[in-house]
Amino acid sequence: MLLTRLASSTVHRLFIVASKPNPHLLHQVAGAALQIPPKTARTMSTTSESSSSSSFKEAFGNYADYLNNLNEKRERVVKASRDITMNSKKVIFQVHRISKYNRDEVLDKAEKDLAAVTKQYMVKLVKELQGTDFWKLRRAYSPGVQEYVEAATFCKFCRTGTLLHLDEINATLLPLSEPSIEPLQINVLDYLLGLADLTGELMRLAIGRISDGELEYAKKICQFVRDIYRELTLIVPYIDDGSDMKIKMDTMLQSVVKIENACFSVHVRGSEYMPLGSSEPSSFLLGVSDVEL
């Protein structure tokens, strides 16, 4: 009982002492609070902000350098694509000079010119697009590659009557690349787009062969273009980026129809047809009514 009273008395005295304000103690507490160095925290924040700002500047500087280099490369790729397009067209024009009298001579010259396009202009494109850049810059060089595919397949058909495959074209580009870097390979879409353009050149060739009296050759061209159109008709619905191909398919169908109409006209009116440069009625169409298109 006595211990209880002593404990309660002691607690009461401590409560009274604690409840009375002690100026000296308050001064010590306030002084301790005032001595907290805010400058230290402010200095640390400033240092952190400056280092963060420096890292941002460095990062965006790297991005700017990358985009500038990419834009400069795009300009060089566009220039190389224009050169390839122009010189590939020259190869195609050379092939159109073909006739039944100068076939080998014309094709030899065209194939030589095509090899020059590969060594002088395609090599520039290959050096610029080694690695993964050929996917980023495809729109910049695709027109030139399509024209190159058109010229190469045109020469192959006129020489052998067969189609030049994508693997064969890419095999000719492998020696142009460095072995340590991923080589440039023409993608399937650009190959198919070039193949679609080929049918227009074959249509012009067929009309010219009919004018020279080579009806059988024109019929062979007609069947070849039909086969290409039929096969591409099955593939186009599955192409993701097929807007360009769908437009070219309409042009390809027009080419097929023009060749068929020309061959059909000669077949029906063969007895009235006279080859250019001939003073006699058509000798090459004797018995043409027995030919099945």
Image (tube, grey):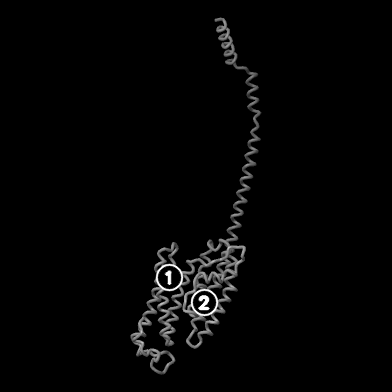
Give the residue at x 55% y 82%: 108
Q: Label 2: few (<14), some or many (≥20) within 10 Å?
A: some
Q: Amino acid at mark 2?
A: Lys
In this orientation, which residue lies closer to the viewer: 153 or 124?
153
Left or right: residue 175 versus residue 103 is: right
Give the residue at x 44% y 78%: 202
| Image quarter hosting the N terminus | top right
Give x and y (percent) for residue 90: 53, 78
Give the residue at x 38% y 89%: 285
In this orientation, which residue lies closer to the viewer: 23 or 60?
60
Q: Secondary structure at mark 2?
A: helix
Left or right: residue 61 versus residue 164 is: right
| Image quarter hosting the C terminus | bottom left
Distance, label 1 to label 2, CA atoms, is: 18 Å
- What mark, if any, has residue 27 been given in the picture? none
Q: Quadrant of residue 44?
A: top right
Q: Are marks 1 and 2 in contact (CB under 8 Å)?
A: no
Q: Amino acid at mark 1?
A: Lys
Give x and y (percent) for residue 50: 63, 44
Which residue is under mark 2? 89
Give x and y (percent) for residue 214: 43, 86
Which residue is under mark 1? 248
Q: Secondary structure at mark 1?
A: helix
Can you say whether 42 is above or below 22 in the image?
Answer: below
Label located before the other in sequence (1 or 2)? 2
